[in-house]
Image (cartoon, rainbow, N blue to C red):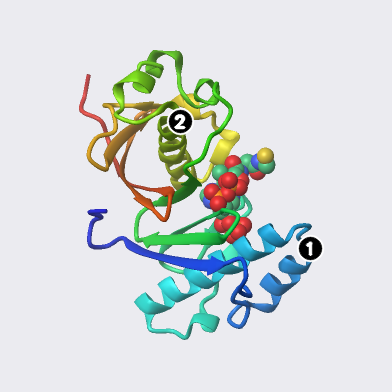
Amino acid sequence: MRLPDDILLRFAVCEVTADPPLDILSDEERARLDGFGSEKRRREFALGRDTARRLVAGHTGEVPEGVSLRVAEDGAPEVDTLCLSIAHASTDTFTLAGAVASPLPVGIDLEVVRPRRPDLYRYILHPDEYGLMQTLPHDHDTTQVLLWTLKEAALKAMRTGFRVSPKALRFVMPPFEGMAVLRHEDTLWDLQFAEVEGCFVAVAFGVTSPPAR
Ligand SMILES: CC(C)(COP(=O)(O)OP(=O)(O)OC[C@H]1O[C@@H](n2cnc3c(N)ncnc32)[C@H](O)[C@@H]1OP(=O)(O)O)[C@@H](O)C(=O)NCCC(=O)NCCS
């Protein structure tokens, strides 16, 4: 992905046969881990937090366990001086986590490319966007997962998540060569995407005002 220089990105993979990394988690994060009902959620949370701490520490020069990583009221992860976003996804064999940080709002999503319900696109896309299902050079399942990943990355950069419908974000042009642009009301989000380990990863950034109509 060709991200602007001030956007930091880090990935980590943990095989399901390996223990997730726990040694640099805070006491609060360990307490949250104990409250999760599934091993998958524990693994994803631990790997995501570990990845985010190492990403931020690499920038600030702190030790990873010294990074003050908090959860905001809206659920988004927060650190001092940077905007931060975390995503994770799991297959039967591994968990993949990604973290992205920037001085400006930024969001990341990761989704495994695998079959989903065939009509998923109707939840993601505004009816005016249904043509994208035929325009993009992928099969139906892959196209749905890509469009989902792009819209969710922008919803995370906005920090609303799915409290805002993905249909409220509209593609300004069809995603092309790893790039996309989404509009939400008067805000444009630039996106870069790629396929990593059988997953789509998308990063949303760069809030710009659209040209005057
Ligand atoms: C934010 C959201 C899109 C994440 O989607 P997801 O499929 O659960 O998981 P992802 O791997 O993409 O991302 C998970 C990370 O998103 C981050 N996150 C949580 N809320 C967030 C928000 N409002 N904005 C940005 N990021 C958020 C967290 O860091 C979380 O990881 P962690 O808890 O392990 O640290 C989704 O949880 C959501 O829409 N939340 C808001 C609405 C809500 O709370 N609904 C209740 C559940 S249906």
Q: In what element is the residue under mark 2?
A: helix
Q: Total of numbered circles in the picture?
A: 2
Judging depth in this view, the residue of 67 and 53 nearest the camera is: 53
Circle 2 residue: 144
Q: CA distance from mark 2 to mark 1?
A: 32 Å
* Residue 129, horizontal then vertical, whole percent: 38, 18
Q: Which residue is at the far top?
A: 128
In the foreground, 160 or 14? 14
Image height check: is 130 above or below 112? above
Q: Is mark 1 within 8 Å of ligand 1?
A: no
Residue type of the residue flagged with mark 1: Gly
Q: Which mark is residue 35?
A: 1
For image coordinates 29% across by 37% down, the residue present is: 180
Residue 166: x percent and y percent?
50, 30
Picture residue at 23% right of the left edge, 62% below the top: 5
Dividing the image into 4 quarters, which one contains the C terminus? top left
98 in relation to 184, above or below: below
